């Protein structure tokens, strides 16, 4: 059967929207467990926690809404000292790469390139959160955590399926409540926030460990408890993926640890403690061995748009290439869905 040009164009458009609908039908919430980096990461190796929502988007960095066709979802997390807000929502692609066009994602970066990308995105989208300094230049501050996260660190993802009703309930709740920061690293940190989001979907799925983390909620504990919960509830269809750190001259991020784990693994602390207080040191070692061990790399497949066949719009002749693999294997279903959303993403 031979189709005319107009008919073929209509079929391509129909196929594009069908594929988009399929992607949206398999939506979820993914914990992003992010490795520590830099001087602060050396002092506090517990890393950062955020949540990626595939069906939820940002009307603004502080207002949520349902995604429209072709949008890639949002990453939401708690931050310290960013315009006085408790949580901020950033579209997926800018959050990872500080651009809103996949074609502009660099395959390798240095510190100057990252700074330039972040500042350009800030000037276009985030001036209300991070205005220019008195000289009209890029300001200092923690706002840099909002965009380009994949330049600084490797990120592990743990995704569970969610329903439209659950997503709508979360949007209503977050838009209703006052968004004002009262950050506390011990009891009101990024991991507490991620746990709150995931527990709003599945109550009791995330809990703190009073043994492995001395009662503090650590990002690794959020992942560990979510994985444990999913084993008891296989209907959540938990999948794992890893977003590699973009190659370049920037220092590689370090492995993420729990609270007790970081003490046990730090020789400058653990060895003197073992000599001066062997009972305490032994107790910490037991706490780590019994409840503190968790390997986020296990069964994690690489997030790699370049390995996933992308649906093309009628005007596309090529698909974006984004490949920063650092391990073997094909993307998991979760990574494939994220890749599909990202390839269809529109600038916000």
Image (cartoon, rainbow, N blue to C red):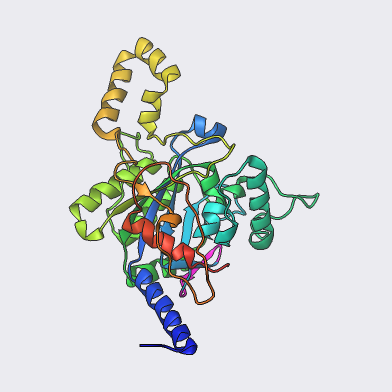
Residue 134 seen in the current view: yes
Kindly identify the residue that appears in the image at 51 percent across and 47 percent down.
150
Does residue 180 show up?
A: no
State the image coordinates of residue 179 (x, y, percent, origin top left): 52, 60
Near-viewer residue (98 or 10) = 10
Q: Is residue 319 above or below residue 225?
A: below
- Give residue 305's position: percent from left, percent from top: 44, 57
Q: Position of residue 14 (x, y in %)?
A: 41, 82
The answer to which quarter of the image holds residue 280 is top left
Judged from this view, the residue extending furthest toward the right is 135
Q: Residue at x 60, y 48 (%)?
A: 144
Q: Hey, which quadrant is residue 298 in on the image? A: top left
Tell which of 235 and 211 is nearer to you.
235
Name the residue at 40% across, 63% down. Answer: 309
Q: Quadrant of residue 169?
A: bottom left
199 lies left or right of 180:
left
Furthest-top residue in view? 275
* Residue 231 placement, left or right of 308: left
Q: Residue furthest front?
A: 2
Tell me, yes or no, whether the highlighted magenta stretch contains residue 221. no
Quadrant of the image for the N terminus? bottom left
Q: Which residues are magenta?
A: 60-69
Left or right: where 118 falls relative to 345:
right
Q: Position of residue 339 (x, y in %)?
A: 43, 60
How many numbered marks have been drawn onto this rendered protein structure?
0
Q: Nearer the viewer, residue 286 or 153?
A: 153
Image quadrant for the C terminus? bottom right
């Amino acid at each position: 059967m031979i189709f005319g040009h107009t008919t073929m164009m209509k079929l391509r458009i129909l196929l594009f929207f069908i594929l988009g609908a399929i992607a949206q039908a398999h939506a979820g919430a993914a914990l992003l467990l992010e490795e520590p980096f830099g001087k602060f990461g050396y002092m506090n190796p517990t890393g950062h926690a955020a949540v990626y929502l595939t069906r939820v988007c940002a009307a603004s960095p502080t207002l949520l809404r349902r995604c429209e066709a072709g949008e890639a979802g949002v990453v939401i997390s708690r931050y310290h000292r960013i315009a006085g807000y408790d949580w901020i929502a950033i579209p997926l692609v800018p959050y990872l790469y500080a651009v809103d066009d996949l074609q502009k994602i660099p395959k390798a970066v240095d510190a100057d390139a990252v700074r330039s990308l972040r500042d350009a995105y800030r000037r276009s989208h985030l001036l209300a959160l991070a205005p220019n300094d008195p000289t009209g230049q890029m300001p200092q501050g923690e706002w840099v955590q909002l965009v380009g996260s994949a330049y600084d660190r490797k990120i592990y993802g743990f995704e569970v399926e969610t329903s439209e009703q659950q997503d709508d309930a979360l949007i209503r709740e977050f838009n209703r409540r006052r968004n004002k920061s009262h950050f506390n690293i011990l009891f009101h940190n990024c991991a507490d926030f991620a746990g709150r989001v995931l527990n709003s979907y599945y109550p009791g799925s995330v809990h703190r460990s009073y043994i492995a983390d001395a009662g503090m909620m650590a990002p690794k504990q959020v992942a560990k408890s979510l994985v444990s919960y999913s084993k008891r509830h296989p209907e959540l269809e938990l999948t794992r993926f890893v977003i590699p750190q973009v190659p370049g001259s920037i220092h590689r991020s370090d492995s993420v640890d729990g609270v007790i784990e970081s003490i046990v693994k730090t020789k400058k602390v653990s060895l003197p403690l073992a000599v001066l207080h062997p009972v305490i040191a032994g107790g910490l070692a037991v706490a780590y061995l019994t409840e503190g061990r968790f390997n986020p790399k296990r069964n994690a497949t690489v997030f790699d748009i370049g390995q996933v066949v992308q649906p093309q719009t009628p005007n596309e002749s090529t698909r974006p290439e984004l490949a920063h693999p650092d391990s073997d294997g094909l993307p998991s279903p979760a990574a494939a869905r994220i890749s599909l959303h990202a390839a269809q993403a529109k600038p916000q």
